[in-house]
Image (tube, grey):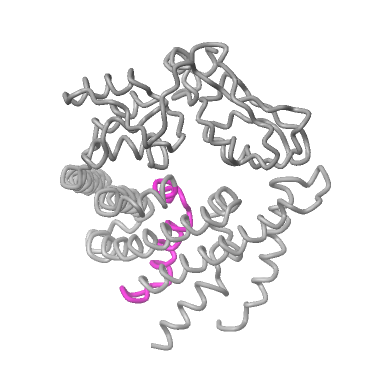
């Protein structure tokens, strides 16, 4: 067969395949839920679980689907509730005390290093990987990364984790310098 | 019927694509470091490989042969595989987000898995009919999954072992793969 004809045939076959893919991509288009992303952006990303959801994203999904109230995030504080209310166009409500209290002064935790036995239990519960250390070696907390969620305090078997006042207001820190960076460039800037 | 059974057994063990024919080594080395991901890759490959071996049979028999364009089979099979992977990914994303998350990155990676193309081409070479092609494709991917899962289990053990510095990582993985390959050679002669 003339090579030119085979060229046309194979191009035609490719075109048909392309059309199939196009049709399928239209037919099975997945609508993302942009509102979830927007809510998630407002939440403080402490991943502390005080809202009763496993993390900030699941809580954002729950808010978006109407399952959860906007007042279940103590780390976000009144400020966070206000922003959520603005985004979702609902009434500003008081923080739900069942989920814990918003702290007036931002707190982070510190390990009393001479008491640390190096059990790694606090490392495992830390949602933002702010604790460094290895088995049977002393651990310490990276203050800048700590979100003050206090999840490590009950995990410590020797009660050597205490809360201290944050050197910088955490809310400011979180906005300028979130615990979890969304891009590498963002992380490298700091 | 017994013919199909032999094709299946032969594709899984005797002519195992990874360890005997040395096809699909990239995912074999790449995603075998964890058991979970190995299983995910295996499942995704099983699905796509079976589907694409059937589709490429149709393309070959009803399009390329009547037009006398057999020499374009590699090109058209690559097309078929790419389209199958893309369409599978999109349908899966819509219909089963959970499975989509489990398979994740592995799904698009299958496009470049040479075992998939190898099966399609071998089907033509062996002049398999439709059912035989499907069984051969399914068997090949089951063999691929089996080896991937076995190898990932071995590699998880190797991670913990005390290995000389110069053998750490890929070298010891390749040595292990070689020994596994020798073991699989033992199946040779079981069925033709």
Q: Is residue A76 above or below residue A116?
A: above
Q: Is residue A12 visible?
A: no
Q: Which residues are magenta?
A: B106-132
What residue is rendered at 41% in x and 32% in y?
A100
In the rendered structure, the answer to whether residue A57 lies left or right of residue B174 reads left
Q: Is residue B89 visible?
A: yes
Image x and y of residue B172, in percent: 74, 52
Image x and y of residue A169, in percent: 49, 12
Depth check, front residue: B74 or A93: A93
In the rendered structure, the answer to whether residue A46 lies left or right of residue B192 reads left
Q: Is residue A84 above or below residue B26?
A: above
Quadrant the C terminus of chain A occupies: top right
Residue A76 falls in image quadrant: top left
Depth check, front residue: A151 or A105: A105
What residue is rendered at 37% in x and 65% in y?
B50
Image x and y of residue A26, in percent: 17, 42
Q: Is residue B129 magenta?
A: yes
In the rendered structure, the answer to whether residue A40 lies left or right of residue B144 reads left
Residue pushed farthest bottom? Answer: B2
């Amino acid at each position: 067969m003339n090579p030119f004809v085979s060229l046309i045939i194979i191009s035609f076959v490719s075109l048909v395949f392309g059309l199939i893919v196009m049709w399928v991509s239209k037919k099975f288009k997945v609508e993302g839920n942009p509102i979830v992303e927007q809510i998630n952006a407002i939440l403080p990303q402490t991943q502390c679980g005080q809202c009763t959801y496993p993390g900030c994203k699941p809580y954002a999904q729950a808010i978006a689907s109407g399952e959860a109230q906007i007042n279940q995030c103590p780390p976000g504080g009144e400020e966070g509730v206000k922003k959520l209310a603005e985004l979702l166009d609902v009434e500003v409500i008081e923080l739900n005390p069942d989920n814990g209290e918003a702290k007036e002064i931002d707190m982070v935790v510190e390990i009393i290093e001479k008491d640390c036995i190096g059990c790694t239990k606090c490392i495992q519960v830390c949602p933002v990987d702010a604790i460094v250390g290895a088995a049977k070696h002393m651990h310490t907390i990276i203050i800048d990364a700590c979100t003050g969620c206090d999840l490590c305090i009950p995990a410590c078997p020797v009660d050597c984790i205490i809360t201290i006042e944050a050197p910088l207001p955490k809310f400011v820190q979180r906005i300028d310098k979130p615990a979890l960076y969304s891009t590498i460039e963002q992380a490298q800037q700091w | 019927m017994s013919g199909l059974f032999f094709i299946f057994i032969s594709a899984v063990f005797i002519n195992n694509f990874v360890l005997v024919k040395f096809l699909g080594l990239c995912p074999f080395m790449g995603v075998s470091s964890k058991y979970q991901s190995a299983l995910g890759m295996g499942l995704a490959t099983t699905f796509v490989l079976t589907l694409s071996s059937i589709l490429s049979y149709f393309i070959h028999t009803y399009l390329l042969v009547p037009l006398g364009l057999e020499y374009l089979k590699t090109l058209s099979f690559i097309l078929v595989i790419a389209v199958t992977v893309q369409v599978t990914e999109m349908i899966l994303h819509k219909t089963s987000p959970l499975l989509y998350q489990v398979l994740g990155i592995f799904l698009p990676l299958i496009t470049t898995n040479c075992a998939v193309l190898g099966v399609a081409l071998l089907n033509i070479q062996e002049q398999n009919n439709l059912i035989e092609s499907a069984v051969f494709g399914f068997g090949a991917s089951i063999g691929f999954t089996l080896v991937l899962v076995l190898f990932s289990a071995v590699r998880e053990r190797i991670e913990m072992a005390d290995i000389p510095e110069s053998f750490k990582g890929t070298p010891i993985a390749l040595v292990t793969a070689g020994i596994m390959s020798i073991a699989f050679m033992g199946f040779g002669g079981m069925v033709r």
